[in-house]
Image (cartoon, rainbow, N blue to C red):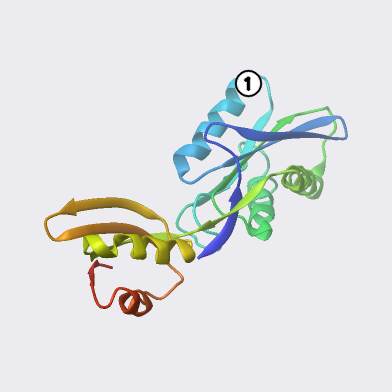
Amino acid sequence: MRYPIPDLPPGEWRETETDVERSRFIAWLCHAPDVAAFETLLSAARERHPGASHHCSAFIAGPPGEQSAIGFSDDGEPGGTAGRPMFQVLEGSGLGQVGCVVTRYFGGTKLGTGGLARAYSQAVSQALETLPRREIIERSPLQLRVDFAGEAEARAWLAEREIPVEAADYDAQGVRLTVGWPRDVEVDLSPLASRLRGHLELLEA
């Protein structure tokens, strides 16, 4: 499976700010490959803005469309006016592995439930506009064995298909290569076997 993710290093985030009826909405976005990365962002937002009225949040810590690692919170705002609208914007972006916090400083004017939902959605949408992105390819480890004479040919074949070699172990029988095989591509090593004249063994799929 291929999908876009935030192109941000661990522990860094993108921050944007918007004002609505004198309330400040500060949106934070991070790369969240797991829930812990999102929680780090949430802790940082609370630490930097301890006097804020709310720290509402949403995250998708896995691939887009999956429901196993998602979450959202209104953090004291009326139910359904913050976290869920934020999550819907993230979901609509097609991004995976993304976390978001919107910090609000109340400006004295009540926005109503509709106004709050629009303000939180707008804050996230605005932050997404400048978010750097890169594509990720989900991979599964695959082990194959070749003899010493076939290693260079095997590595060249894998490189042509942009399949990374993650480890190489050598013993008396040859070389065991651990590669990152794309999950959305069927395992078919017959073209490589032909190039190696059969000196190929699939150990683990």
Q: Which residue occupies 49% across, 38% down?
A: 37
Q: Which residue occupies 76% across, 47% down?
A: 129
Q: Taking 23 as reference, is 193 above or below it? A: below
Q: Which residue is mark 1?
A: 48
Q: Secondary structure at mark 1?
A: helix
Picture coordinates of residue 198, whole percent (x, y) = 25, 77
Residue type, numbered disc 1: Arg
Q: Taking 121 as reference, is 24 above or below it? A: above
Which residue sits furthest front?
A: 149
Q: Residues within 10 Å of mark 1 (few under 14, many from 20)?
A: few
Picture coordinates of residue 147, whole percent (x, y) = 21, 64
Picture coordinates of residue 18, whole percent (x, y) = 82, 35
Q: Which residue occupies 58% across, 21% down?
A: 47
Name the residue nearer the viewer: 110 or 34.
Answer: 34
Quadrant of residue 24 in the image? top right
Q: Is residue 26 visible?
A: no
Location of the C terminus (image quadrant): bottom left
Quadrant of residue 201 in the image? bottom left
Picture coordinates of residue 158, whole percent (x, y) = 41, 64
Q: Which residue occupies 48% across, 46% down?
A: 33
Quadrant of residue 182 in the image? bottom left
